[in-house]
Every structure is written in structure tokens, then in C-alpha cells.
Image (tube, helix red, strand yellow):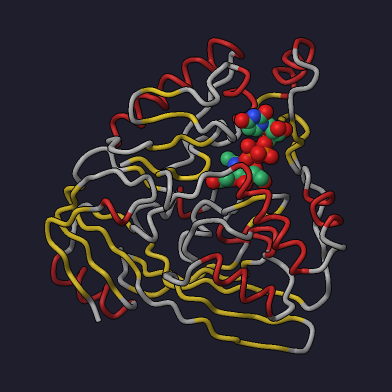
Amino acid sequence: MKRIYNNINLANRNSFGVVEMASTLVEFEGAEELKEYFERYNPERWYVLGAGNNTLFTRSYEGVLFTPISRNRTILKDDGVNVDIRVEAAHDWDELVAWSVSEGLWGIENLSAIPSSVGAAPVQNIGAYGAEAKDAITVVEYFDTRSLEVKRLSREECHFAYRESIFKQELKGVAIILAVEFSLSRTPKPNLGYGDVIKEVEARGGATLVNIREAICAIRASKLPDPKVLGNAGSFFKNPIVEKEVAEELLKSYPDMPHYPIAGDDSKVKLAAGWLIDKSGLKGYRDAAVGVHDRQALVLVNHGGATGGDVMRLAGYVCQRVKECFGVEISPEVNIL
Ligand code: EPU
């Protein structure tokens, strides 16, 4: 059932916990309701607000927020080895990972404990510990607000890249994601190459799905603030991708600077924004109600009572300091409204 709220306070609907209002918020179950709404009101300004883990409101939202509420999970095919599933947009991401681990299904275990809904996962192609959602996604189903039809895109058609997809480009302002299909596998495929993952997995007795999930949850809990305790949106910035020569020049001065190859592009290198912010002296920096997290400098936090404007001022300062110290531009990963 569709539910429409007018003049709604968004404080409980964004993980930063900032207090902002929206003129209208529509909770919807599926495409039929969206079609009816668009036919009737044809809203000019709208945005999809899922679980609100990657959005920063900096002012009242004068438009319509669409929040999916359907959360069914269906097995489409199980041939004994590969299992194809369809999951509706409002399903909690980590509940999906927990379910896959309990069923012995490999593919998304490294993405444990990411605060997200399933519908948001393809938009920025959520990723962590050497895995990305795109590795398991086969299809994304969405409502097209131009044609008012349901459409399906294959993984290739989604144009996934690091924190990128067609939903942040050509289909921004067009698509409302309804469901995502995944292919998971009973064949073990441990992916332990990132950071401390292998050490933490071995400490738990080896590469089982349960051990990998527990190791990743423990690593995340040790570095990342719980949004229920301290408002935040995970990584506030993307890791910057720079020309190889820029990275080589910086490595002469900072031989220990983390840097990662870009698959399929030898001319560019990805740097760690958290390291750059940390080395700019800002880890744990605090400006009134907002701050840089003291255990992971990539995360900006709301210590209580911050506005979106406060967070943006801090973000601007962080970008400026990193630019002054390293000559590198960093940009937000979070959607700013
Ligand atoms: N580092 C520092 N100081 C810091 C933070 C990081 O020196 O304050 C160094 C670390 O020691 C490491 C490197 O920077 O050498 C990378 O740090 P980390 O492994 O913590 O990962 P990240 O690049 O900072 C990315 C994702 C995270 C994801 C981790 C693990 C982005 C924007 N962020 O962070 O994703 O959990 O890798 O895979 O790509 C998120 O998107 O919300 C998120 C938390």
C-alpha cells in the first residue's frame, strides 16, 4: 500500500541524523503505484530515498522522495551449484548477506555489514574488501519515469565501475530501482587478498563463509562508526583516481602511500583518500558538531545536532587541506541534496 507523507521530518530517515524536512515522501510497493503517481502528479523534482545511508540533506527537500517498502526475496533458480535470486529494493543489504552465508552461498560475504538497502547497492556499486556488488549482480529491474514502464538491465548494461553505474549517470533522475537479481554459488570462492582479511580469517580457523563474514564484521566494527550511535554515511569521499605519474611523484616523498592498480587501465592509479586526509593531520579533527572520524579519516561524523551545512563546510575544509598537502582533488561519494 502506498503511503504519502507531507512536510515530513527526515531525521530518522538519514544515517547522518541531520534534521531536514521534505515536502512529500511517498512509500511505494511496486511499479503500479509509481505509474499511478507519475500519471497523476508528474512530479518535476524527485529523488529515491532508500535507507538513507548515502545521502546528505543540506536543506529542506522541495520535491517528492520515493521510498520503496517491498522487501521480498525469491529463489529463481537452483541447479545445485548456482543459485539465482531476486530481491526487492527495500530488503536490508546485510540481512541478504547474512542469509547467503547461512545458506552456504558464496559471492557477497565480503560485503558484510555495509549499511544499505538492496535497491541502493547497484547505484554506487557498493564495495569493500576486494569485492563489489557488481560481481554478483546479474539484473537490475527499475521503473522508468519517462516511459512509465518497468525495464531490466543486465550487469553489462549497468556500466558498473568503482562507485559508479548508469544509475549515477544516464539514468540519474530517470530510474527508480525495484529489484535486483544476483547469482550466488555453492562453490567456495574465498577472496581474502585485501588488507587484514586473511589474518582475521585464519585467526578464526580458515576460509569458511561464516569465518569470512565474522572477520569482515570485526574489521569494520573496529574502524567504522555505527550510524545508530554516531551519525555518518560511511566513506564520505571516493578514493581519488590519479594519473600514474602523479602517484609516482608522490611516492618519491611518501614511499608508504597506499596505492592500487585500476583493472584495465595502466595509466591511472587509485589512492586512499583516508590516508591522504589522515596525513593532512585531520584524523579526529572536530569542528563543533561535526568531525573527521578518529579511526577512519574517510568518514565524517555528526557528533550531535549538526546540520547538513555543517557537514558540507567540514567536507570543503578537508578537500582544501588535502589539495594543499598533496595537490590531489578528492570528491564526495555521498549524494548531496
Ligand atoms: N588509511 C589511513 N588512515 C585512515 C584511513 C585509511 O592511513 O584514517 C589507510 C589504511 O591504513 C590503508 C588505506 O588507507 O592502507 C585504505 O584504508 P581502508 O582499507 O580502511 O579502506 P579505504 O580505501 O579507506 C574503502 C572503501 C570502504 C571499504 C574499505 C575496505 C571507498 C570510498 N571506501 O575505504 O567503503 O569499507 O575500502 O574495502 O572506496 C564505504 O563506502 O562507505 C566504505 C566504508
Figure quadrant of the C terminus = top left
Marks counted in the figure total 0
Percent coordinates x, y for residue 253 in the rendering: 75, 10
Percent coordinates x, y for residue 160 in the rendering: 60, 53
Q: Which of 47 and 231 is in front in this view?
A: 231
Q: Decide if residue 121 is on the left or right side of residue 276.
A: left
* Residue 46 in sight here: yes
The residue that appears at 63% across and 45% down in the rendered structure is 222
Vertical arrangement, residue 205 with respect to residue 165, above or below: below
Figure quadrant of the N terminus = bottom left
Q: Which of 120 and 150 is in front in this view?
A: 120
Q: Which of 17 and 244 is in front in this view?
A: 17
Q: Quadrant of residue 105?
A: bottom right
Percent coordinates x, y for residue 178 in the rendering: 42, 71
The residue that appears at 60% across and 23% down in the rendered structure is 278
Q: Point out the quarter of the image occupied by ligand 1.
A: top right
Vertical arrangement, residue 109 with respect to residue 203, above or below: below
Vertical arrangement, residue 269 with respect to residue 83, above or below: above
Q: Decide if residue 66 is on the left or right side of residue 163.
A: left
The residue that appears at 74% across and 30% down in the rendered structure is 259
The residue that appears at 49% across and 59% down in the rendered structure is 116
Percent coordinates x, y for residue 205 in the rendering: 87, 63
Vertical arrangement, residue 327 with respect to residue 20, above or below: above
* Residue 241 in sight here: no
